[in-house]
């Protein structure tokens, strides 16, 4: 969209300087809009920087037919969202900023430098060069029709009217990065439905036996299959003092959250069937009893030391040991606090958003990124979801400007 010099350029506010807000800023600036970007923190992109510590998994290389099934919440919208800004486009975007990407063995996509600070610096510099103005230490505290935004700043309360506003204030994990979810009340004050923000991609708590913890804390349970309800994930889990962490349990979080008594069943020997284990146990039955205080675990099963210790301290003394190995029932106390989670589930309900992600109750105000009620596992799906929703919302904002420019003129 091009605005002629004769007409004053429309002015847009973006609230939130994470990847979603920054992505929207570049589209709006390229579309001829004057962009003011506000963030509560002293600098933008703090969670993006934290994500860089883990290698910055930007997106995933798997087939789109599978990719689009990774999202929960707003399912019918994802094929269109991902077509609008695809994983390939995200890789091209990074390349354009000087960061080539590569596909890791798991299919995940990373920038060559495996961190985010260089990419973020280049991104912010490019936005400034395109005229985007950054206003840090501005926390949005109120919104009104108009649209009007009220910020709390170090110099006091500041009210500003804009032509359009795009909200990209993130979820509620890692609040020290600025994403604290306090915006929920700002939107609920307008009767906008927001589902509660809950920890996602997070560890779950287990009441470990102190002796098990003494032996296994910080060690991985490798080559296991974890099952929650009807869903199973192969991978590994890390034993922590609080419970279990790792990709397998992150991926099962959505299923676990629906359970009254969340329980994870672990297959500690996926390479062997139950019958196979029993047969091996029978053959080994003449062999000496294992040095276990509670359960007879044949050495011929070749369990990892952590799996063996888990059974020793957490399986009943009597019973079918092979059945425990194939479906070890791990009752979970609950998820770790949202402050520790990689992402949060919940957010602005899809029914509040039109096809361009504009709030139907607050025309002219659009929403993008983790603020919306969707969830996805780790693997690059989170950042991809932020880029794709921000692209659609910013393009929707440009189109809405176009549609209304006659009335405004
Ligand atoms: C440890 C960790 C590792 C991660 N690793 C990956 C990864 O490798 N791959 C991946 O895909 N995803 C990863 N993520 C998730 C990813 O970083 C987030 O999904 C993404 O940053 C969300 O982007 P966003 O722009 O929607 O929100 P955010 O990045 O959370 O940004 C929101 C911004 O809004 C600002 N803000 C909040 N409230 C207000 C307010 N009231 N007024 C003004 N400003 C406000 C905040 O200060 C913040 O700057 C990781 C997350 C964590 C915590």
Image (cartoon, rainbow, N blue to C red):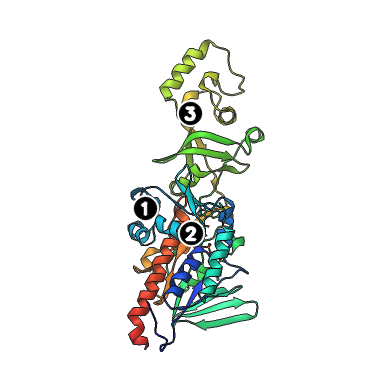
Identity of the residue drawn at 35% across and 75% down: 399
Q: Quadrant of residue 207?
A: top right
Mark 2–mark 3 distance (CA, rounded to whole Å): 41 Å
Disc 1 crowd rating (10 Å Cα; few below 14, some 14-19, many 20+) is many
Q: Is residue 204 visible?
A: yes
**SS at circle 2:** helix
Compare marks 2 and 3 and give the one earlier in the sequence: 2
Residue 25 lies, in percent from the top left, at 48, 71
User: In the displayed image of the protein, which residue is found farthest to the right?
Assistant: 214
On screen, 209 above or below 245?
above
Return the residue at label 2.
94
Q: Which mark is residue 269?
A: 3
* Tag 1 residue: 68
Helix, strand or loop at mark 3:
loop
Where on the picture, by quarter, is residue 316? top right
Answer few, some or many: residues within 10 Å of disc 3's Cα (few below 14, many 20 plus, some between 14 and 19): many
User: Left or right of 194: which side holds 176?
Assistant: right
Q: Is residue 179 visible?
A: no
Image quarter (top left, top right, bottom left or bottom right) of the N terminus: bottom left
In x, y percent, where is residue 156? Answer: 63, 80
Question: Which comes sooner in the sequence, label 2 or label 1?
Answer: 1
On whether ligand 1 comes within 8 Å of the CB at mark 3, the answer is no
175 vs 139: above or below: above
Q: Nearer the viewer, mark 3 or mark 1?
A: 1
Q: Position of residue 182 (x, y in %)?
A: 55, 67
For label 1, the SS is: helix
The C terminus lies in quadrant: bottom left
Q: Nearer the viewer, residue 53 or 73?
A: 53
Q: Earlier in the sequence, mark 3 or mark 1?
A: 1
Q: CA distance from mark 3 to mark 1?
A: 31 Å
Relative depth, front residue between 53 and 290:
53
Spatial CA distance of label 2 from label 1 is 21 Å
């Amino acid at each position: 969209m091009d605005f002629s010099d004769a007409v004053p350029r429309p002015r847009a506010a973006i609230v939130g300087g994470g990847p979603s807000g920054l992505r929207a800023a570049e589209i709006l600036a390229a579309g001829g809009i004057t962009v003011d970007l506000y963030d509560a923190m002293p600098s933008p992109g703090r969670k993006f920087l934290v994500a860089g510590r883990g290698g910055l998994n930007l997106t995933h290389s798997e087939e789109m037919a599978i990719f689009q099934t990774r999202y929960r919440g707003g399912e019918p919208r994802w094929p269109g969202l991902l077509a609008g800004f695809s994983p390939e486009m995200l890789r091209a975007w990074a390349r354009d900023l000087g960061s080539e990407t590569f596909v890791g063995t798991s299919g995940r996509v990373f920038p060559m430098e495996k961190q985010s600070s260089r990419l973020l610096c280049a991104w912010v510099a490019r936005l400034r060069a395109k005229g985007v103005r950054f206003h840090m230490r501005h926390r949005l505290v109120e919104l009104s029709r108009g649209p009007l935004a009220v910020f709390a700043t170090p110099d006091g309360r500041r009210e500003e009217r804009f032509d359009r506003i795009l909200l990209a204030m993130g979820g509620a994990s890692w609040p020290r990065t600025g994403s604290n979810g306090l915006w929920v009340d700002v939107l609920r004050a307008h009767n906008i439905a927001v589902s509660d923000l809950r920890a996602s991609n997070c560890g779950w708590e287990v009441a470990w036996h102190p002796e098990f913890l003494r032996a296994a804390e910080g060690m991985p349970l490798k080559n296991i299959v974890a099952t929650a309800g009807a869903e199973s994930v192969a991978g590994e889990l890390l034993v922590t003092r609080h419970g279990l962490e790792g990709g397998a349990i992150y991926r099962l979080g959505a299923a676990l959250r629906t359970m009254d008594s969340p329980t994870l069943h672990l297959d500690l020997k996926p390479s062997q069937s139950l019958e196979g284990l029993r047969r091996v146990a029978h053959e080994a039955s003449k062999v000496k009893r294992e040095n276990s205080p509670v359960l007879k675990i044949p050495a011929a099963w070749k369990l990892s030391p952590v799996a063996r210790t888990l059974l020793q301290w957490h399986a009943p003394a009597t019973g079918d040991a092979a059945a425990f190995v194939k479906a070890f029932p791990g009752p979970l106390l609950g998820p770790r606090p949202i402050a520790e989670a990689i992402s949060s589930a919940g957010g602005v309900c899809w029914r509040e958003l039109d096809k361009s992600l504009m709030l139907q109750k607050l025309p002219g105000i659009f929403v993008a990124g983790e603020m919306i009620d969707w969830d996805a596992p780790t693997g690059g799906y989170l950042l991809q979801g932020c880029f794709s929703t921000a692209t659609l919302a910013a393009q929707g904002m440009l189109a809405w400007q176009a549609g209304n420019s006659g009335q405004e003129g």
